[in-house]
Image (cartoon, helix red, strand yellow):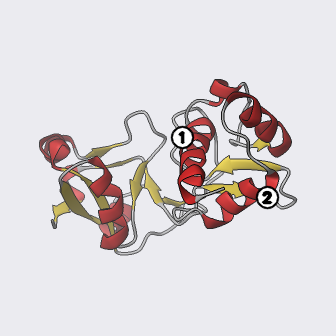
Amino acid sequence: MNDKQLKSIGKFLSLILRHRPETIHIHLDENGWTDVEILIQQMNKFHKPITFEELKYLVENNNKKRYSFNEDKTKIRANQGHSVNVDLNLNAVTPPDLLYHGTADKYLSNILEEGLKKKQRHHVHLSLDIETATNVGRRHGKLVIFEVDATRMHKDGLQFFKSDNDVWLTDEVPVGYLKKVK
């Protein structure tokens, strides 16, 4: 399977494991897990054929580490970014001093007025560095980067979580904790 095919399957996998499992008639449990054999069977039936080895390669080599297997590789889930109701069992953790959020300038006035909101997702996604925030934000249009005063947010009682793929998550980022840096 070539890189273009893997990218296409990866996008589809993200869609079904984060937003629309019903597309291929699979079920996510309360923690977002689904059975690997059933996933492969249903992907082969409703999308593009994939083998376990190809799925394993996708999980292990996805540049954003979007997916995880359980220990015996019989179940798979997306690490974060769900719009469907799942509990990823994330524990609140102390964040680094600063985090970053990449977005597009078309959202700038809304963000400056309301802060960062999770909208249909479970959390607002934040990055540890400007480079990652840049890669995320550039997908949405003309790039804008916000610096988030995570230490002050945490001291003020807002919680942070860290997903398995090192994305920092929080319920919201009020305007007073944001600083536009790009």
89, 16: nearer the viewer: 16
Residue at the image position 33 percent from the left and 72 percent from the top: 131
Measured as percent of width and height from the top left, residue 132 is found at 37, 67
Query: What amino acid is found at the position of numbered circle 1 in the picture?
Result: His
- Which badge, 1 or 2, comes first in the chain's sequence? 2
Query: What amino acid is found at the position of numbered circle 2 in the picture?
Result: Glu
Residue 22's quadrant in the figure? top right
87, 2: nearer the viewer: 2
Q: CA distance from mark 1 to mark 2?
A: 25 Å
Q: Residues within 10 Å of mark 2 (few under 14, many from 20)?
A: few
Q: Is residue 118 visible?
A: yes
Of helix, strand and loop, which one carries label 1? Answer: loop
When the figure is inspected, residue 109 is found, relative to residue 137, above or below; the finding is above
CB atoms of marks 1 and 2 within 8 Å: no
Residue 40's quadrant in the figure? top right
Image quadrant holding the N terminus, namely bottom right
Residue at the image position 23 percent from the left and 46 percent from the top: 115
Q: Is residue 160 visible?
A: no
Question: Is 159 on the left or on the right of 35, as rendered?
Answer: left
Measured as percent of width and height from the top left, residue 119 is found at 37, 35
The image's mark for residue 65 is none
Closest to the camera, between mark 1 and mark 2, is 2
The image's mark for residue 53 is 2
63, 150: nearer the viewer: 63
Which residue does the numbered mark 1 point to in the structure image?
82
Question: Is 179 on the left or on the right of 71, as rendered?
Answer: left
When the figure is inspected, residue 156 is found, relative to residue 83, above or below; the finding is below
Image quadrant holding the C terminus, namely bottom left
Measured as percent of width and height from the top left, residue 146 is found at 23, 61
Count of marks placed on residues: 2
